Image (cartoon, rainbow, N blue to C red):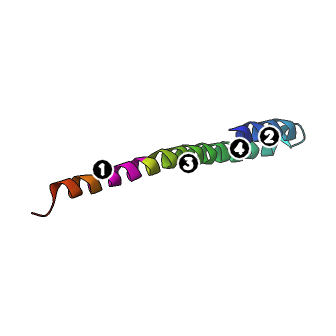
Amino acid sequence: MLVLLVVAGIVLFVEKFVHSDFKVLLFSFYVLFAMFGTFYMSYSIAKSVVEPLDRIEKKQERSTQATSGPN
């Protein structure tokens, strides 16, 4: 999140020196970068939540199989 804020500050600073024809291109690249960054952060959070849940689910399956015994 901090990276997106820093890049936004850099874009606003660089915008003063960029020709007006290229400002749309600059902001378009920033929007694409922000979308990718947001997706990556969401994916990382989801991955960090799912991994422990998978381990818990596997432990429950093993304990269920151990208690049911062979059929």
- The amino acid at mark 4 is Tyr
* Residue 21 sits in quarter: top right
The Cα–Cα distance between marks 2 and 4, rounded to whole angstroms, is 7 Å
**Mark toward the start of the polypeptide (1 vs 4):** 4
**Mark toward the start of the polypeptide (1 vs 2):** 2
State yes or no: residue 22 in magenta.
Answer: no
Residue 63 horizontal side relative to residue 27, left or right: left
Dot 3 alpha-carbon crowd within 10 angstroms: few under 14, some 14 to 19, many 20 or more: few
Callout 2: SS: helix
The residue that disc 3 covers is 44
The residue that disc 1 covers is 60
The Cα–Cα distance between marks 1 and 2, rounded to whole angstroms, is 50 Å
The Cα–Cα distance between marks 2 and 3, rounded to whole angstroms, is 25 Å
The Cα–Cα distance between marks 1 and 3, rounded to whole angstroms, is 25 Å
The Cα–Cα distance between marks 1 and 4, rounded to whole angstroms, is 45 Å
CB of mark 2 within 8 Å of CB of mark 4?
yes
The residue that disc 2 covers is 11
Q: Residue at x 86, y 37 (%)?
A: 13
The magenta stretch is 53-61
Dot 4 alpha-carbon crowd within 10 angstroms: few under 14, some 14 to 19, many 20 or more: some
Quadrant position of the N terminus in the picture:
top right
CB of mark 1 within 8 Å of CB of mark 3?
no
Q: Residue at x 74, y 36 (%)?
A: 5
The residue that disc 4 covers is 30
Pair 3/4: label in front = 3
Dot 2 alpha-carbon crowd within 10 angstroms: few under 14, some 14 to 19, many 20 or more: some
